[in-house]
Amino acid sequence: MAERTVWQRRLTRIVQPIEAALVHGLLALLRLIPVQAASAIGGAVARTIGPLIGVTRRARKNLLNAFPEKSPDEIETIIRDMWENLGRVVAEYPHLSRMKVFTPNSRVEVLGTEHID
């Protein structure tokens, strides 16, 4: 792999803190709205943008190799659903500290607690 130039390293030192600030700001905004709304927004954004990102080519290739019987439309549905799930998880992350896991009607289902002891 080619070594990065001095300018590339300097640019990285500038860009990464900006990216981090944007992500922290976005997560802070998501924390201000109800978890259901945050989850829906995260899912919609990721479902829309995710399939356009380069890494999706690898997912598409892997799915085609793993499921040769699936049609291109089925593969695209899986990819969109994959991105939607990731977007929902990220958008729900700021709400984790407020989620009550062991209460009735929780958003989280806990299985296998009998194996803890």
Image: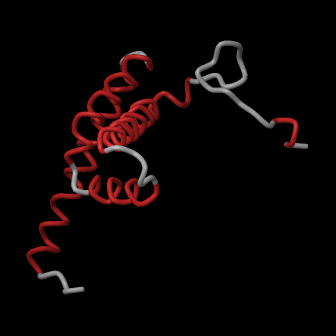
Q: Is residue 108 left or right of residue 113?
A: left
In the rendered image, residue 102, in percent from the top left (x then y), is placed at: 72, 23
Q: Quadrant of residue 115?
A: top right
- Screen quadrant of the C terminus: top right
Left or right: 108 as drawn, with respect to 117:
left
Quadrant where the N terminus is found in the figure:
bottom left
Residue 95 screen position, x and y as percent: 48, 27
Placement of 99 over or under 86, stated as above or below? above
Furthest-left residue in this view: 7
Determine the residue located farthest toward the bottom in the rendered image. Answer: 2
The residue located at (33%, 30%) in the rendering is 42
Residue at 35 percent of width and 29 percent of height: 43
- 86, 18: nearer the viewer: 86
Q: Eyeballing the image, is 45 above or below 7?
A: above
**Residue sticking out furthest to the right:** 117
Q: For this rendering, which residue is in front, 74 or 27?
A: 74
Q: Is residue 114 above or below residue 7?
A: above
Count the labels in the image.
Answer: 0
Q: Residue at x 67, y 27 (%)?
A: 109
Q: Give the residue displayed 37% in from the left and 34% down from the top.
A: 84
Please identify the quarter of the rendering in which residue 90 is found.
top left
Q: Quadrant of residue 38?
A: top left
Residue extending furthest toward the front: 69
| Colour logic | secondary structure
* Residue 104, percent from left and from top: 71, 13
